Amino acid sequence: MAEQELNNEAVFSILLHIVLVSKDRQNVFRGEIKMKLRDVIRDICQEQRVEILEGNISSDHVHLKVSVAPKVNINKFILLLKGKTTYTLFSNFEKLRIKYHNRHLWAKSCFCCSCGEVSKEKIEGYLDSLTPVAEETVTEETPW
């Protein structure tokens, strides 16, 4: 599991499991295509400051476990993955352009879920690490 990250605005640990499936579950990710797809996904993640924790490219789908910052728009990130990989693969492999008629490489939908768990101890550790707040500002009677 990835450690918590810190930037000048937040402490965070946001882990996502993303699955992208080829259109009609065609077995297209093999050989050179698979290697190029892997390289493009790595480049996109590096540009977007998304850390790939685990990844697997099967012949008809891609699994990614990534760590993202709070500012990352997940929907836009997935659309970027689909768009750039399609453009790059179609540009480099004519057989894909012919097979898919220069249109969609990926299925319309995708799967994305958060993964990981936060224990009570981890939350308490984070709260304990914060600077104590003056007692008069936060009391038991203070309503949320």
Image (cartoon, helix red, strand yellow):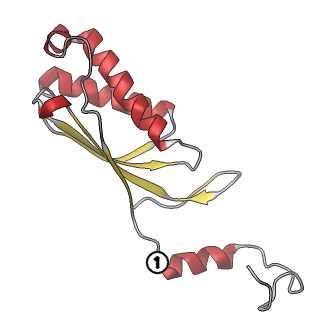
Which residue position holds label 1? 119
Residue at x-position 80% and y-position 91%: 141
16 left or right of 48? left
> Residue 123, percent across and down?
56, 76
Pick out the residue farthest to the left. 27
Please tell me which residue is depicted at 34% across the width and 29% down the height of the picture. 82
The C terminus - image quarter:
bottom right
Looking at the rendered image, the quarter that the N terminus falls into is bottom left
The structure residue drawn at horizontal position 25% and vertical position 11%, both measured from the top left corner, is 102
From this view, report whether residue 78 is shown above or below residue 116.
above
- Does residue 105 appear left or right of residue 75 in this picture? left
Q: Position of residue 84 (x, y in %)?
A: 38, 22
Task: Look at the picture and state if 81 lies above or below 141.
Answer: above
Q: Nearer the viewer, residue 17 or 6?
A: 17
The picture quadrant where one finds residue 97 is top left
Viewed as shown, does residue 135 lie left or right of 46? right
Q: Residue type at mark 1?
A: Ser
Residue 99: quarter of image: top left
